Amino acid sequence: MSLLSAVFYSALFLFLYATAARIARYAKMPPHLRWELYPAAPEKGASEGSYLEQQEWWNKPRHRSRLAELRFQAIEMFLFHRCYVNNRGIWRFTLPFHWGLYLLTCWLLIQFPCSGAAFFLETLGRTTIFVDRAASLARPIGIVGLVLAAYGCTGLVLKRLTDRVLRSATSRSDFFGLFLILGILFCWLLSWGLFDRSFAGATRYVRELAEFAPLPGVNPFMICGTVLFSVFLAYMPFTYMAHAFAKYFIFHKVVWQDAPMAQGSETERRIEQLLGEPVGWSASHINKGASWSKTVSSPPK
Amino acid sequence: MKEASHLQNSLSHTVEARDLIAIPYLPDGVDGKGITPLSKEQLLRIDCSFDGVTALGLSAPQSVEEEEKLVRSFLDGLRKLFQPDTNWTFLQPLTLTLDNCARCQTCTNACPIYIASGGKEIYRPTYRADLLRRIKQKYLGGSRIWARLAGNDVQLNWTTIAQLAESAYRCTLCRRCSQACPMGIDNGLVAREIRKLLSQELGIAPRELHRLGTVKQLTVGSSTGMNPMAFADIKEFMEDDLKERTGKQIEIPVDQQGADVLLLHNAGEFIAWPENPEAFAVILNAAGISWTLSSRLSGYDGVNYGAWYDDIQLARIAATHARVAIGLDVRRIVVGECGHATKALVVTADSLLTGPLRINRESCLPLLRDLVVKDALHLDPGRNDFAVALHDPCNLVRLSGIVEPQRQILQKVCPQYREMTPNRTNNYCCGGGSGFAIMSSANFMDWRMKVAGRLKVSQILETFRDCLDPGIKKYVCAPCSNCKAQIRDLLSYYQLDKKYNIVYGGLAELVANAMTDIPPIL
């Protein structure tokens, strides 16, 4: 394995570990008080409302629609509808940027299994012509993804530099993340433009990475892009750029919770446990040290 | 944001009248002046460095030691905000918001206060969240060097705390920002959690919400100061008033054991708008519903200001309401026309009412809708033949999902019913949310009228633009006590009541007014 491969795989390992840790941190947090927001996509029906629109709702069946949830998520993921409605200036760049990332990810997800299959077939002494063909057919996806992502990222950076409101709201670390991505994309664009117009080099590069091969003849922009990408992989789980995973919790555990606490449920059991814990706040109207239950049943001092 | 630490009463972000957005169709001469500045004497005592306005009336520490103690307490509170044993109530939603905001500012275009102010930077929904984020990163994040590299140079001192505190009371918690956000980030929640840190750790909260609000409700019986004896007097007054107005003896039951419904009004209704609880009495009696009010401590006041600033007070009041209902052995609690009271008891405190405190709770709107739509009442919509516009209370609509029942009622009893734009879950806040409707100290009322309520005034005038003639009666229907208070103040402040004959009221009054078995009550 080359040094470059080692850097990449170390960063990938860190990315996977840190992302898993972040997801676990959110998942392990205690049950919270209800904090819904409507319209909640899973609520079936044409109205924007909730089950609370029914009198004696506790006696009525509640219908949730998984399809409606998926439809909402698909519209947001692929069309960025909320951004389109409320922030058209950003939408013009964030849409192609994210589409570019999706296409690049698709390209990588095709390359890695093709590489693994090719390695396996070669070991068996079989032809790899079909696997190689599949990998090469995916090249336009990679090229289009690269161009879209670079265009979108450039637009986002320029928008944040030139828009008064965005400029004042964007911190140094926010700019660092954006410039890092821009650096990666431009390195890869230059690698494609100057050394690898057919994208065959990139395809071969991913294959050699997947096979832990020594990576001979890689151009300097590809090296630079890979190093920057490795930095990005290691850095991303510690920033807001890992929001894709957080969205599951935000929507499914908070704003779309949209259900009363069931009596006798695990949630009720956990909350009763929490109500038995001491209150740690110090203001004078709170009995610090007494349990939540005791504090709640006593008047303020 | 760096400035937050260094500007004490320098008033560099004051709200100027010329910056505010124009309100269409306003009568001439009613919007000329800006926000009244604090007097010299007030400026000596009170910090208003955030924007020249004060909601909290905070005074600067008198010594360096006092300031250091305050900063330490603040950091203790900040730590507790992110620990599962102290803030289990909102840890997950708060952490998700602070960790994942991309600062894209999509939320700013949805914030009515930001829009009304003409785009004032300090009213951006992300402003206070970013300040809190930076403080947390620098002082709880572990590495000050990394904080500096990241461009985080906020200093935590008295001025920063005072400005953060005031900024938390420039948000009505309407959560329109969260609705607009592609990721569901909730900057309204951040404002609430900052308020919670201040109240539960430092004991800082507006007196209208705490000492004269939740504490009074729990000790005297009502945030209005009404004790059980005064409530009994008001109940008698309402029955006498109903007899005078309708010619009928309409009883208002109190403490009826085993009734189907415990009706929980915002106690402000009894004092400021008794026609609303009277209307409920007429409607429920005519429909043959078994119902009761309660005279027990806090049992006649459905408000729960804790929903806006303090989880302990929220829990105390919700538990008290549940205990009152269980003590009366009623089948369900029905919350009257009050948005935050509905949301607090039916939604937010749902998880807190475990075991024996579990009792069925719902809004009054589905009950009223079913009575109207299923013809349980004899109604003549011709009695409400004037322009009626529906205001959508945030707590009922966007935060609890109760959207259509009030519309179904108005479509049946008001032939000239019309919608505001935007409406339903896209509504604009009245500007009185999160306690603002009852906060009028110093110059906060001015800010509430000129900034917080500005978009709502614009909306009301736009909705009635074709009938602004003062000879034509126009009614803003607000099925929420806090919204009514704010709209009352807005109509008076901008002289829309006198100049355009725009009045306001609740929903039950319109239903009762349409009932043919009594004379019109409006």
Image: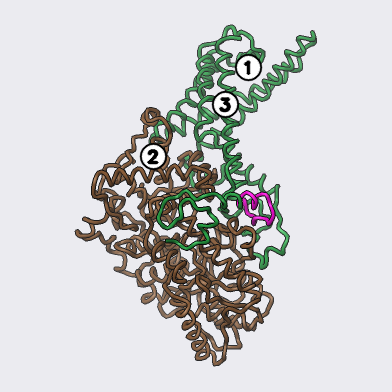
Chain colours: A green, B brown
Structural distance between the alpha carbons of marks 3 and 2 = 27 Å
Whether residue B389 is visible here, answered yes or no, is no
The residue under label 2 is: B135
Whether residue B522 is visible here, answered yes or no, is yes
Earlier sequence position, callout 3 versus callout 1: 3
Res B493 → quadrant = bottom left
The residue under label 3 is: A15
Res A214 → quadrant = top right
For the stretch drawn in magenta, what is the main secondary structure?
A: loop
Mark closer to the observer (1, 2): 2
Mark closer to the observer (3, 1): 3
Q: Please, is residue A3 above or below residue B269 in the view?
A: above
Q: Residue at x 59, y 18 (%)?
A: A9
Amino acid bearing label 2: Ile
The residue under label 1 is: A206
Task: Specify whether residue A256 is painted magenta.
Answer: no
Q: Please, is residue B144 above or below residue B176 in the view?
A: above
Q: Mark 3 falls within which chain?
A: A
- Count residues near mark 2 (Cα–Cα under 10 Å), then give few for <14, some for 14-19, many for 20+: many
Q: Residue at x 60, y 50 (%)?
A: A273
Q: Mark 1 falls within which chain?
A: A
Amino acid bearing label 1: Val
Mark closer to the observer (3, 2): 2
Evaluate whether label 3 is on the same chain as label 1.
yes
Write the start and end of the magenta stretch as one range. Answer: A257-271
Q: Is residue B286 left or right of residue B146?
A: right
- Count residues near mark 1 (Cα–Cα under 10 Å), then give few for <14, some for 14-19, many for 20+: some
